[in-house]
Amino acid sequence: MKKIGILTSGGDCPGINATIRGVCKTAINHYGMEVTGIHSGFLGLLENDFEELTDASMSGLLNRGGTILGTSREKPFKKNASPEQQERRQLILDNIEKMQLDAIVCIGGNGTQKSAAKLAGIGIPVVSIPKTIDNDVWGTDLTFGFDTAVTIATDAIDRLHSTASSHKRVMVIEVMGHKAGWIALYSGMAGGGDVILLPEIPYNIQNIRDAIIERINKGRTYSIIVVAEGIPTDGVKRAGEYMAQMIEYETGIETRETVLGYIQRGGSPTPFDRNLATRMGGHATELIAQGNFNRMVAMKGNDIISVPLEEIAGRLKTVPADHDLVVQGRRMGICFG
Amino acid sequence: MKKIGILTSGGDCPGINATIRGVCKTAINHYGMEVTGIHSGFLGLLENDFEELTDASMSGLLNRGGTILGTSREKPFKKNASPEQQERRQLILDNIEKMQLDAIVCIGGNGTQKSAAKLAGIGIPVVSIPKTIDNDVWGTDLTFGFDTAVTIATDAIDRLHSTASSHKRVMVIEVMGHKAGWIALYSGMAGGGDVILLPEIPYNIQNIRDAIIERINKGRTYSIIVVAEGIPTDGVKRAGEYMAQMIEYETGIETRETVLGYIQRGGSPTPFDRNLATRMGGHATELIAQGNFNRMVAMKGNDIISVPLEEIAGRLKTVPADHDLVVQGRRMGICFG
Amino acid sequence: MKKIGILTSGGDCPGINATIRGVCKTAINHYGMEVTGIHSGFLGLLENDFEELTDASMSGLLNRGGTILGTSREKPFKKNASPEQQERRQLILDNIEKMQLDAIVCIGGNGTQKSAAKLAGIGIPVVSIPKTIDNDVWGTDLTFGFDTAVTIATDAIDRLHSTASSHKRVMVIEVMGHKAGWIALYSGMAGGGDVILLPEIPYNIQNIRDAIIERINKGRTYSIIVVAEGIPTDGVKRAGEYMAQMIEYETGIETRETVLGYIQRGGSPTPFDRNLATRMGGHATELIAQGNFNRMVAMKGNDIISVPLEEIAGRLKTVPADHDLVVQGRRMGICFG
Amino acid sequence: MKKIGILTSGGDCPGINATIRGVCKTAINHYGMEVTGIHSGFLGLLENDFEELTDASMSGLLNRGGTILGTSREKPFKKNASPEQQERRQLILDNIEKMQLDAIVCIGGNGTQKSAAKLAGIGIPVVSIPKTIDNDVWGTDLTFGFDTAVTIATDAIDRLHSTASSHKRVMVIEVMGHKAGWIALYSGMAGGGDVILLPEIPYNIQNIRDAIIERINKGRTYSIIVVAEGIPTDGVKRAGEYMAQMIEYETGIETRETVLGYIQRGGSPTPFDRNLATRMGGHATELIAQGNFNRMVAMKGNDIISVPLEEIAGRLKTVPADHDLVVQGRRMGICFG
């Protein structure tokens, strides 16, 4: 194994640069490999857009947000077996030959894992690393970026307590999570949410009303509601706005919403995410050195392992209804819907 | 002077508790006064809802967000000279007598300054302290809460740089400021905004487009747009959403918006705001001890001074078009509209 | 089971209040138990010093540092079987009877686990929860407080990079860890340390010198050295000061040290630690409800489990020489001594 | 005016890069000047070590700590009028001619202001910008870096409260400030220090003891002592260690110290400091464009002005004994020695 390519695809996420650094420094310093950084995800593979990475170019990356390689949502292949499909396939194979790459590391979320599996399918030696603030990639207990997103969301919830208590209001905060409520669950529990709504657990507005009213009857003059963006709404309004209106209507209590948005995915990763990203990057290089391809690096308990790429594609890791934090939250009196 | 009352009115803001602490500890330790905390702003004055404050009850307040006294947007008097008006006036005078208060400290924003002036108008000895994250109270160079809000907004802008650069996008962030663009100006300049839009400076969408296109021509693949919530829109959409749509339409570049919302006003105040709040609180007590009433505490340069309440009411401190940061920003190539 | 006591012993640590909250809210809301908070660790048990805890008194504890119950390093029993020993034993049994406690939750580090085992030895139903920023309690993969300490230490290391690079210096930072180097390892890796020294791995000053010189030869004008306080020194100087002097002597490069000290253990816990603390607190109450005593709550992989107290006492969890982060660090070129 | 040089000298400080950016972007975008960055302070002037700076190279500097130009404590001239003196003078004049510089911007603390005055003395057009976390440069109300240092120190003091209260201890924290106690004063007041000791105000250990004892008598079980590193000691121990030992001896209460050290000067500047640095940088370029040389940029109230360099040299701005925060602190019961 002489030369590896590395690309980052899909939404950006804190820790990508740290994992690029982990891949490169291990490859260069330990295995004497060369590393090529492919720009803008799979687009760079199609457009032959890349740069050589060195040990020196890894300086300052550990705590830097975003991805130095750029990213895109471009997929390497079109869905149907069109003539264009064939062309793209050949283009990619040609470019990889031009770049003289012996293997490719794909860093990305669920979509990227699918694309990586397809690259593997046309014979390219691939190792992938999961990355998403949403923590919804199947096959790994955790993804880097998640702890940072939870930290940002919890910090925001901490701040809302001041306003909620001073004004005796209900404050609704909408955090990211279309299909999986991991951020809502972890930040809601860490931030002292009174109601936490996940896409995985159906809610009943009466239960939410009752929970808020019960708090008032106990002398707690305000409530914090944490909702994932993917909970059911009227199909028009955003989750936060919808829930705030429903609660104000049902309880008569002044209710305000905040949508946390993009700040959840930016900025410097937490130390936890930096170390997870570093370990995953190093493990990816190990797999390549061993010739162990077509696998996704994963965390299992405390260990970094890998799983076959084909097992991942098309599956989503959602919050199980009996997740320990949900069970524990319910016991403490938190309403999950 | 034996006993003073203190109330907090209007939107909550970081540093209120620090200024309550400044008033109380000075009054109790230095002047041997007693201090009564009135609950929920002017509502507490109408409902005779209060508690006694002690030196011990000030413990832990310096870095605590919100207001321990609670707040409301209740005004002490109705607008017109109705019979109810007369009733409220008497109720307040009666309650102040019941509470045995010799003077009242009113902590609040522009609305509160008006109400404080009216209290003074019916013969109650009043001293007020300005408080708003918006920094738009006339008569004072700065208000506590502003530096904290700017810090939170700048932190959010810092985070958006990661996503904007990784995705080669335009990112629009909407910060607070209905009529005054102080937060947008200070956080936009500190966060490296490329376009900064304030309610005080009319914008032209062509200029904004040109600024973004010029950046791309120079090889800067992304732009950050900071907008105050009070800039002109189509009258339906929020400022951030409207501007993002306009920019995407005009430039064809993928544009996303974030509305920072309530997290700007919550949480622990910055050290700057804690010290400003402490000094203002202490100065308010000084004024009372001197019998120097119907004044608002203010900052002028580095000094804490006071100004007559009657000068404040009905005036708003907006960003002058030749503000040093605006001038400096323009020289550096930042587009202000 | 009707009434449980809870005490916190040993050094304070972020997350203690969150775990007290976890115990109490689960006990009160889910099991209908009563909870007594014992003051100042085992001292409160000897002096019958306590307060009743309610659901309402848990408000605001999730993100509050330190321990609301106070702590001490007092041990419940003296070492030798002296007459005083017998007295203390009786005093404790009498006080527990006075307080009408059916079980006691002991929250603490290694010393506390030993004391908890001794309490169990005289027939008191005990459940313990591990707590230490040092992460060195045997039997649990992680302790809350550790992630917060690592976060504070990493933030400090991030800051040192500015000064080190501006002045082309070697900067040495000493972090906590007498016998176990967990904080040094995790913060050193997350903060981009070039040399990381743990008590568990012997160092050779020549290797450290070579690592620094090699960096200079590669054009890296500065180095960051992270040392645990417990590494071998001359027996007089602190670890940081000693290492800084050795490095300056060996390399001739200006070297400065920083001792992080107590700020590592104070302040608000990270969301990670809040959730770990909450889960451990809830699990402790579960064990009591099940009558499953004389066990310490523990984390194993992602699960909260429990282990017999007798297995813990006298053992220390140190960093294994083949820990994944050490192995990964070495591959990336980091010097571990 | 065609081409300006810029150098940074003395200790690093948050905001230097922001002020370099302010100088450059104003010079390049507004005045069409060229800018040369001189490396390692005055050393680069002696060794002809420099790089050209462009608008593009200013990207990402606003929130980056340290100085991209590097710094040193090298002085341009030796003290006495030695032959070497004459040589250095000629070397500097020659190098400035080689670099084709029409003026030089010197960014630094008190030492740098002296050196800048000397450069002016041999006929080089100089404008200087004050920079120090210590805030002790004469002629300016504030220096950038100070707000950041105060913020870091206050955050540390906030953390110490947890440990101090949990253990009922006295905690002493030593912050920077050899001759001027600005950081101790501002962070001590913002962090809720009970005793604050500055080099400018003599202390009496009995007063400190009394203040601590009085707190205990009032039921406050712990105290926080903030000391500047420059307060008088026994001449051997550091200020923090000395004061901790004195307090423990005098009061019998367990006392621990923390020395904050280098982390006070590193890392990303606060928004306040970024804007101050930007304004000062822009103003320096203005002065050059106007041909207004041999002046130091300064803050006066809210305005950026300039003062003659000759007025600054050899003077130090210390905390006046009647500073508003000292007076206010005393009224609130804080002991200043």
Image (cartoon, coloured by chain):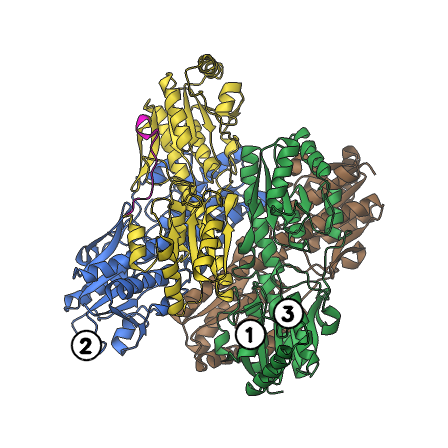
Chain colours: A yellow, B green, C blue, D brown
User: Would you place residue D23 above or below residue D99 in this image?
Assistant: below
**Of labels 1 and 2, the one closer to you:** 1
Residue B328: x and y in percent read 74, 47
Q: Amino acid at mark 3?
A: Thr
User: Would you place residue B275 above or below residue A58 in this image?
Assistant: below
- Label 2: state its secondary structure: helix
Are the residues flagged by discs 1 and 2 from a single subunit? Answer: no
Q: Main secondary structure of the magenta part?
A: loop
Q: Nearer the viewer, residue A130 or C186?
A: A130
Residue C281: x and y in percent read 29, 59
What is the chain identity of the residue bearing mark 1? B
Q: Mark on residue B43?
A: 1
Which residue is at the far front?
B83
Q: How far is mark 2 from mark 3, CA to CA?
A: 56 Å
Q: How far is mark 1 from mark 3, CA to CA?
A: 12 Å
- Label 1: state its secondary structure: helix
User: Would you place residue D112 above or below residue D325 in this image?
Assistant: above
Q: Circle 2 is placed at which residue position?
A: C97
What is the chain identity of the residue bearing mark 3? B
Q: Amino acid at mark 2?
A: Glu
Q: Residue at 24% across / 56% down in the picture?
A: C297
Are the residues flagged by discs 2 and 3 from a single subunit? Answer: no
Indicate yes or no whether the magenta region holds residue A319. Answer: yes
Q: Is residue A35 left or right of residue B278?
A: left
Indicate yes or no whether the magenta region holds residue C170. Answer: no
Q: Mark on residue B112?
A: 3
- Neighbour tally class for label 1: few under 14, some 14-19, many 20 plus, Cα within 10 Å: many
Q: Is residue B145 left or right of residue A178?
A: right
